[in-house]
Image (cartoon, rainbow, N blue to C red):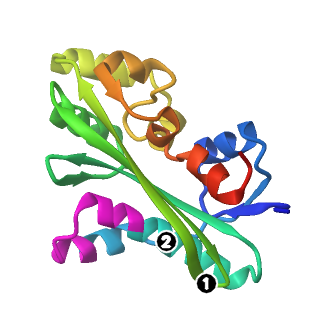
Amino acid sequence: MLNKIILASKSKVRKEILDKNNIESDVMPSNVDEDIVKVSLLKERASPEIISKNLAELKANKVSLKETNKIVLGADSVIDLNGELISKPETREEALTILKKLNGKSHFLISSVCLSKNGSMIWNYTDKATLTMKNFSDEELTSYLSKISDDTLYAYNVYQIEGEGRNLFTSIEGDEDTIMGLPVKKIKEHLGLL
């Protein structure tokens, strides 16, 4: 029987999803330098999906090397806008630029998860949701961002789907947990918790 897993992420959202689904976890961030990995993979023309998968695996493997015989969960989410990789914003200016890019268009939100043990992947899964954003003026986007706290902005990418962010979209197709960064139903299925 699974006692507890280790979440190789400092994402409060992912921890909340695990807690809500009664999956006990300890948090141990991997501290993988995602930018270096992304730049390297983009040079090789890797798709956003491959980048997301690789980052989830790298995070899980790194932590599971230190935590012998424990199951470690790594996760990563990216936005794919017509093949262009869009990462989480580091500043409010970046967040506004991202929203302007997504404005009036459809994009994919890709979430990958990986379970590792003793430094090796034992299972992985990638899911994709399609989100279509309404058309907004620059002023409306600036106003939207002004209502969101820094914590929320940097934790949930540029939109918080279970809060204000839902109003940005004309349509959302896909699993809500995937959009929030953790396709938990598949994890539970794999761990025999369903």
Please tell me which residue is depicted at 36% across the width and 25% down the height of the picture.
145
Amino acid type shown at disc 2: Glu
User: Magenta segment, which residues?
Assistant: 40-53
User: Which mark is drawn over residue 26?
Assistant: none
Residue drawn 42% across the image and 56% down it: 126
Instruction: Determine whether, in the image, residue 157 is placed left or right of residue 169.
Output: right
Task: Report the disc number at residue 57.
Answer: 2
What quarter of the picture does the C terminus occupy? top right
Up the image or down, 95 lies above or below 59; here it is above
Residue 153 position in % (x across, y down): 45, 36
Q: Position of residue 164 (x, y in %)?
A: 44, 19
Q: Which residue is mark 1?
A: 119
Q: Secondary structure at mark 2?
A: helix
Q: Nearer the viewer, residue 185 or 147?
A: 185
**Magenta highlight: main SS:** helix
Q: Quadrant of the N terminus?
A: bottom right
Q: Residues within 10 Å of mark 1 (few under 14, many from 20)?
A: many
| Spatial CA span between label 1 and label 2 | 10 Å
